[in-house]
Image (cartoon, rainbow, N blue to C red):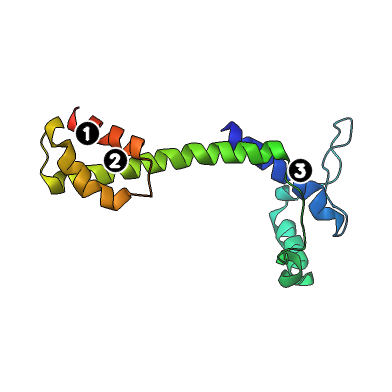
Amino acid sequence: MAFIKEVAKYFMDFLETDFHKRKNPKRSVQFRSRINLVIGLNLNKYPSFNNLVWKGINHTFDKNVINTVQKGVYKTSIPKNLIDLIKLQSEKILKKQIENLLKQIVEESIRESGATGASDLGKVMKVLMPKVKGKADGKLVNQIVREKLGA
């Protein structure tokens, strides 16, 4: 969860700073003053007027102008610590996915070879290796096969 919060914080900072430097200044509606007094009107209390205001806004602005962000126009450098955090998390996820996939392939190879115990390790490896050779770590494959065969 901390990873998601860090990434979200980074992109929120980006959208609030770099993204808006090349566009019109950021506009916001404030309902409270600096000393927390209510200012303005909360239009949610007046649904018919609120709908009328949004209708006017939506018909005034062309949706293509508001929603279009061209590829490559807005760029920023990503901090090294964020890149490291993303790399660490993706490696953890990738490692688990690879291990789960290998377990499925090993189970399939055990069924194909008809292996029943640790003594059939060679049979399983003979069926398994053409499927994973050069694609997976041999030590990990061997460890999973031994684990499944009870060796």
> Where is mark 1, residue-wise?
148
Quarter occupied by residue 5: top right
Quadrant in which the N terminus appears: top right
Find out whether the residues at labels 1 and 2 contact each other: C-beta distance under 8 Å: yes
Taking the image as shown, residue 27 lies to the left or right of residue 75, namely: right
> CA–CA distance between discs 2 and 3?
41 Å
Nearer to us in this view, 135 or 56: 135
At label 2, counting other C-alpha atoms closer than 10 Å, the crowd grade (few under 14, some 14-19, many 20 or more) is some
Depicted 97 relative to depicted 117: above or below:
below
Task: Name the spot of residue 139 as percent of width and height, x first.
Answer: 35, 35
Identity of the residue drawn at 73% across and 64% down? 69
- The circle drawn on residue 13 is 3
Identity of the residue drawn at 12% across and 32% down? 119
- Secondary structure of the residue carrying tag 2 is helix
Nearer to us in this view, 8 or 150: 150
> CA–CA distance between discs 1 and 2?
8 Å
The amino acid type of the residue labelled 2 equals: Lys
Q: Earlier in the sequence, mark 2 or mark 3?
A: 3
> Where is mark 2, residue-wise?
103
Identity of the residue drawn at 41% across and 38% down? 96
The amino acid type of the residue labelled 1 equals: Lys
Find out whether the residues at labels 3 and 1 contact each other: C-beta distance under 8 Å: no
The amino acid type of the residue labelled 3 equals: Asp
Nearer to us: label 3 or label 1 = 1
Task: Name the spot of residue 109 as percent of width and height, x first.
Answer: 20, 46
Nearer to us: label 2 or label 3 = 2
- The circle drawn on residue 112 is none
Q: Earlier in the sequence, mark 1 or mark 2?
A: 2
